[in-house]
Amino acid sequence: MAKLVKQKTAVIDRFTDPRWRLNNLYYITDENGQVVPFRMNWAQEELFEGLHSLNLILKARQLGMTTFIQLFCLDNCLWVPNTRAGVIAHNQDDAKVIFRDKVKFPYEHLPEGLRMTIPAKQDRAEELVFANNSSIRVATSMRSGTLQILHVSEYGKIAAKYPDKSREIRTGAFNAVHAGNRIFV
């Protein structure tokens, strides 16, 4: 009996640990098109260890930052009720691709029991709304509503190519995230 209690406690401890969940629950498509379990690489691990409210990521390409941030958003939406996460991309097509490949794919590849425990009530091309009242959506702007997590992908490209959109993000989207919550740029 004591062994069973110990095992049950170990399982509960794992599921309350975001690092464990990120490294053990989610599947992604790797650079070779293979479906593989997600495991944080050195750059993602460093970001995870140093998370702040405002996370500015100056990076080289292909370090998996968008993948990590989207899994972080998804994980928070699944495990923290009433979480609102938003992703801004420089255009709607890229926003949809990020959402399809980095949010919906990992969600759809979760173990069936977890998906049944935290089902998606609404499943659209740009938003998932979960039974725990959390949601994650993608767009080219996020002025309305209040977010707990915001990811602005390719902000430098947005600022250079679309200065008005950049101003909209600065004045609208950043202000939609209450102090103490998380922004990734």
Image (cartoon, rainbow, N blue to C red):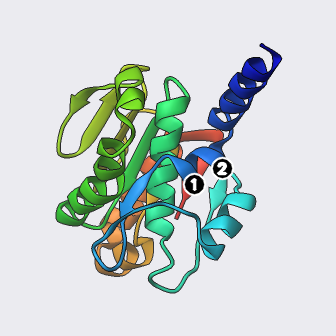
Q: In this view, does 27 lie to the left or right of 3?
A: left
* Type of amino acid under label 2: Arg
Q: Which residue is drawn at 76% across and 18% down?
A: 5
Q: Is residue 106 left or right of residue 12?
A: left
Q: Separation of disc 1 and disc 2 at Cα?
A: 6 Å
Q: In this view, does 182 lie to the left or right of 1?
A: left
Residue most extreme to the bottom:
60
Residue 175 spot, x, y in % from top left: 52, 45
Q: How crowded is mark 1: few (under 14 residues within 10 Å), some or many (20 or more)?
A: few
- The quadrant in which residue 28 appears is bottom left
Which residue matches tag 1? 23
Q: Residues within 10 Å of mark 2 (few under 14, many from 20)?
A: some
Residue 181 seen: no
Residue 91 spot, x, y in % from top left: 23, 65
Which residue matches tag 2? 19
Front residue of this view, candidates 19 and 144:
19
Front residue of this view, candidates 112 and 152:
112
Quarter in which the N terminus is drawn: top right
* Type of amino acid under label 1: Asn
Residue 128 higher or lower than 118, as above or below? below
Residue most extreme to the right:
2
Front residue of this view, candidates 7 and 137:
7
Residue 78 higher or lower than 59, as above or below? above
Residue 29 spot, x, y in % from top left: 33, 66
Residue 155 higher or lower than 118, as above or below? below
Q: Give the structural element (helix, strand or loop) at label 1.
A: helix
Q: Residue 154 carries which label?
A: none
Residue 40 seen: yes
